Amino acid sequence: MMRAIDRGLANSRIGLVLVTPALLVRLQGEGIADKELSALLRRDQLVPILHNTTYEKLEVVSPLLASRSGLSTAEDTMTVVATKLAELVSPQAD
């Protein structure tokens, strides 16, 4: 499984991470999620999407991820977030 994740990261042009309270707990455990996050942060390809949490809570666990521009379901509706994501990942965004 780790090899498949590694190939996916190598071939990706952008990474989206849904930041939830559960992810904040998992990142503290230094498991697979932590390794994937580190790889995406290193390549400057990461867009956080906050849901049911805040940038302040994220900054306690991952200051690097919290420093990224992202989207928040507290600031925009899910429809607006989905539209912005579609624009971000469309081939014309390159």
Image (cartoon, rainbow, N blue to C red):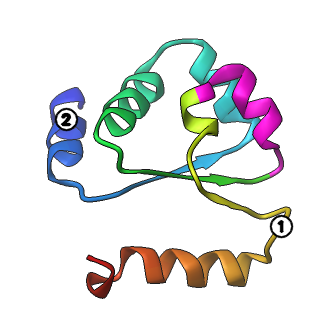
Name the image quarter holding residue 42. top left
- Report the number of discs: 2
Circle 1: residue type: Glu
Which residue is drawn at the image coordinates 39% and 36% (left, top)?
41
Instruction: Say above or below: 28 vs 51.
Output: above
The image shows residue 57 at horizontal and vertical percentages of: 80, 31
The quadrant the C terminus occupies is bottom left
At which x and y percent is residue 72? 74, 60
In percent of the image, x 44 and y 75: which residue is there? 88
Q: Most prominent secondary structure in the magenta stretch?
A: helix
* Magenta stretch holds residue 73: no
Q: Nearer the viewer, mark 2 or mark 1?
A: 1
Name the amino acid, label 2.
Asp
Residue underneath mark 1: 75
**Image x and y of residue 64, in percent:** 54, 30
Residue 18, compared with residue 64, is above or below; it is below
**Element type at mark 2:** helix
Nearer the observer, 45 or 10:
45
Q: Quadrant of residue 80?
A: bottom right
Q: Give the residue at mark 2.
A: 6
Residue sitting nearer the eye, 22 or 79 = 79
21 vs 75, nearest the viewer: 75
Above or below residue 54? Residue 83 is below
Magenta segment: 52-63
